[in-house]
Amino acid sequence: MAWLPVLPENPVVLLVPALLFGFALKFFAVWIAMPSAWYLKLLFSACLLFFAGALIEIFQWPPGREANALLAAVFNALGALCTAEGLLARSGKSLGRTALVATMAVATVGAAALVYVVPWIDAHGAFENLVFGMLFLSVSYQLRFLLRRSRIEAILFWVLLVFALQYFPRAILTARNGWPTDAAVVEHSGVLMMHVSLGLVSAGLAIIVLVASLADLIERLRSERNRDDLTGLYNRRGFAEKAHALLASSADPVFAIMCDIDHFKGINDRFGHAAGDRVLTAVGQSIANRVRDGDIAGRLGGEEFSVVVVGLQAHEAAALAERLRMAVFELRNLAEPEMAGLSASFGVAERRPGENLWNVIERADAALYDAKAEGRNRVVIAPPAEGDGTDAAEARKVAMAVPGTLTIH
């Protein structure tokens, strides 16, 4: 006898699958726009898996309580694991292969045991809710650091926590009312309320995850717009945007370090522009590897780089510039012929009262040209503001420690 779907009389029971399918389409659209964010693929898959599990329960395919309950449990467990892993992957975390396999095994083997072995089919829904509640509580705990991030991230954490906790009262209600497996029970008022509440909480979680995903996309587009393709450092626009914000928010000492690769035109003329690009990439990476978190490093154009640092004293800024000079100088030890004889000159200037970003950059640039004039491959410190003799004296200590490479003007 052919299977015929059991059509529910109350369309409200279709709320959950309708929402799930709609959110699957939305996650798919964002994934197309941001294909490298594979967490979106997991969330898209999770929506489809939950969608399939809901349809299996509502339309009762395959027929028979045992087979129907077990197949729905498999789809729901896969959907829950994809959701959990997707949420964690967005923040660079993972449940790990062992936890994934163990959770899947517990969910499916436990459901199969309650359906076929005990048998206690009405309890398998309560068991499933308990497993999912524990799973998402674990995810919430791993993502608790979201509370220290943006408002969207904090809201995401609280909605996820509510999503996790709602499984426990659902487990109690499911154990009390039994598991819905026919149209009459599916449309029972208590079961109907569980479907509606699940739909609302799931929609809330999906909406905030979508908002956070769109924020990720916007940040990625902004980052790509503000990054130099060759070096990975900020380009001129990104550097200016970040450095202006840093200067506006800090009352600590601010230093600008300017860097220019020595004889770069000769490298291009002798070895070609591809070799010149390799030099720029290597210098950019050397700078990026030696600045601190929070420092702003960028390629302003051509062979010119800049770093803005906050919270250092003059001698510390001078020492940082000297470490950057040595890092570039040591690139000549690489095998590539264009790296032979490589060096760079540096200028350092401290922001004076009333100066904006480009004022201090201009003075650091003037110190850089002094370094070129004095023989290249050296660091020159711009004259400090009046009254800063102590810092200047400290900077001179650095100059004495590396004679011939660092001078104070």
Image (tube, grey):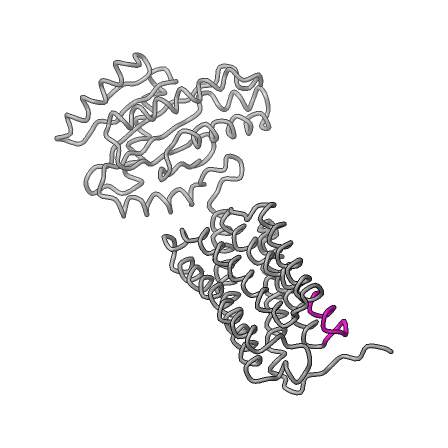
Farthest residue toward the top?
403
At 53% from the left and 19% from the top, the residue drawn is 339
Q: Is residue 74 visible?
A: no
Q: In the rendered view of the protein, which quadrant contains the C terminus?
A: top left
Q: Give the mark count.
A: 0
| Residue 219 position (above or below residue 165) | above
The image quadrant that residue 381 belongs to is top left
Q: Position of residue 145 (x, y in %)?
A: 40, 51
Magenta highlight on residue 71: yes
At 64% from the left and 77% from the top, the residue drawn is 180
Q: In the rendered view of the protein, which quadrant contains the N terminus?
A: bottom right
Farthest residue toward the left?
387
Magenta highlight on residue 268: no
| Residue 346 position (above or below residue 144) | above
Range drawn in magenta: 60-75
| Residue nearer the viewer, 131 or 343 | 131
Q: Is residue 185 visible?
A: yes
Q: Position of residue 336 (x, y in %)?
A: 58, 18
Farthest residue toward the bottom?
9
Residue 336 as seen in the image, left or right of residue 250:
right
| Residue nearer the viewer, 314 or 97 | 97
Q: Position of residue 203 (x, y in %)?
A: 53, 70
Q: Position of residue 211 (x, y in %)?
A: 49, 62
